[in-house]
Image (tube, helix red, strand yellow):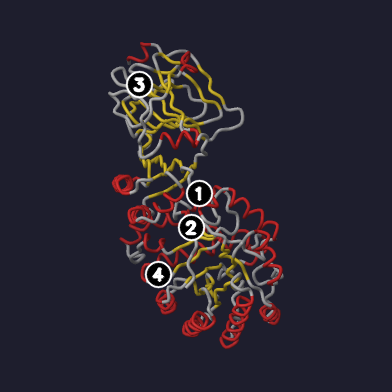
Amino acid sequence: MLTLRAQTLTDYHSHLITPEYRAALAEHDMLLDEGFPLPQWSAEVHLQLMDEAGIAQSILTHPAPHPYFGDQEECNRLCRQFNEQAAAICRESKGRFAFCAVLPLPDVQAAIREAQYALDTLGAAGVKLATNVYGQYLGDEALDPLMEYLSGCQALVILHPHKPSPVNNDLMQQTPLAMQGYLSETTNAVCNIISRNVLARYPGMRVVVPHCGAYLPIAIPRMKALYPVMRQNGLVGEIDFDKNISCLWFDLAGSPNEGTVDALLTITSRDHLLYGSDYPYVAPVAVKNILADLLKRGIVGGDASERRNNDDMIIRIAEIEVYPQYLADYLAVAAEIQKASLAEEPGVICLFPTQTKEDSTQIRILEIYASQQVYDHHIQTAHFQKYKQGTLHMVKHLKLNDLQPLTPETMNTLFKRFNMQQPTSESLNSPWPKGEPNTGYAQYFIGNSYLAPMDGGLVNVTFEPRCRNNWHIHHKQVQVLICVAGRGWYQEWGKEPVELKPGVVIEIPEGVKHWHGAAKDSWFQHLTYHKDVQEGASNEWLEPVTDEVYEK
């Protein structure tokens, strides 16, 4: 059984196009059935690309269209022929290629027999399933015996979109399927699988969804939102979203830009992202360029040590938006994983969940891990897995902002399980460092303040009682305040002041005139960093905050 290796250079989305399959399409006048011609493929050229790009293994699958042209016996023969040819190519490649078998649907029993032969005799890594076979979509009740068999085998199942049925040929001619229709088709099929609770009923399958999850980051939250009403009116049966989604992995073939990956991470986690090239439909130069970008961003790679020095700390801010109806449940789960992680994992230095003052559904979590090894262990723990699976349906949006270390030697000193011995005000009773007197910006403050620069652009600012900065404006950047100790105030021009306590997060938009500082009877600390920084970003310091304004 092939083990899914998340974030490694195994290619989970590549196609084998044989001369015999091309000839069968020509015989039935279907070479352009999917709207564009089949590309050429050879093992030699594919292996050369893999060597140049650094791809360790490629899993070959049958292309579209599905080899059923109305004659089931012909379909059985074509599928067997393809699978045996693929097995021979894989043997000759000495492990560089693996394959997922094509099954002779719509005959379900024939498909089960072929799956058994391919998995047990030919050594197939799994099976490939079309989103639909001439109108029979995945999730169809008639396919349940096949799903049961594949689940029992704990089979890897790679999905691929095919021409929708029915299809608007004029629309398809104007906008080829590869441009948009395949994404809709994949979304329809996976939503049908979820709607019929297939993967909750047959959880042994490991299903790979192509093309960066298609439109599922939009569709799944909508399904969840409408499910109670649909269920109440008897329009759908029971759906266990968490169990269904936990069986899904997602290949990154297509356009895995930052926005696409961020959207995908709202419904899954990084350990369920898989590399996919879509070769030979994607040109070799594009394969190499896309892969180089993914490697640079740390989305895919080899061992964790190849992506990051194992001794480097990991520092990030997780920006999370929670559905309002699940807010209380989410906060309870977040508190539970924070407590368990800090109690049981010495290398988890900080998990600090907070809420923005303006919108309590906006959660910000400061995460600090002592090393990559610590993080890799953390995401495999039972409490993290419980958190991940238990909150997938609660989270509307997730973005992980990794912070680049600037002075790692300082961080290694500052953060060792909060053994931070920097002097702090006793009244704060804070684990965060007080830092040094803020002499560089003293002219813009009333009272004494202290700065403790940290890693990744974070700064801890400590204010003595009544200390506050002048009115000021951030241009071409957004400032984030994370309140960690004591009590303070934040005020925007023309608005009422907002009280700051530990756990409160303030995001200050670009161009807004404001001030912040300590309460008159309390020391105060907040972490701060800037995001969405544009070229030419700056701070404009203005007049002091008068006692009259401060005392209000």
Residue that label 2 marks: 216
Residue at 58 percent across and 53 percent down: it is 256
Question: Viewer-proximal residue, 63 or 239?
Answer: 63
Report the Cα–Cα distance between label 3 and label 1.
36 Å
**Amino acid found under the numbered disc labelled 4:** Val
Report the Cα–Cα distance between label 1 and label 4.
27 Å
**For marks 1 and 4 on the same chain, the one whose residue lies earlier in the sequence:** 4
Question: Viewer-proximal residue, 48 or 280?
Answer: 48
**Amino acid found under the numbered disc labelled 3:** Ala
**Amino acid found under the numbered disc labelled 2:** Leu
Question: Viewer-proximal residue, 206 or 321?
Answer: 206
- Residue 531 point in image, percent of width and height: 51, 35
Q: Seen in the image, is 76 located left or right of residue 248?
A: right
Residue that label 4 marks: 198
Residue that label 1 marks: 262
Residue at 34 percent across and 34 percent down: it is 503
Q: Seen in the image, is 76 located left or right of residue 217?
A: right
**169 shown above or below 476:** below
For label 1, the SS is helix
Decide: few, some or many residues near mark 3? Use Cα within 10 Å; few <14, some 14-19, many ≥20. many
Report the Cα–Cα distance between label 2 and label 3.
45 Å
**For marks 3 and 1 on the same chain, the one whose residue lies earlier in the sequence:** 1
In the rendered structure, find residue 518 and report the number of the disc placed on it: 3
Question: Viewer-proximal residue, 524 or 265?
Answer: 524
**Amino acid found under the numbered disc labelled 1:** Asp
**129 shown above or below 223:** below
Q: Seen in the image, is 217 located left or right of residue 68?
A: left
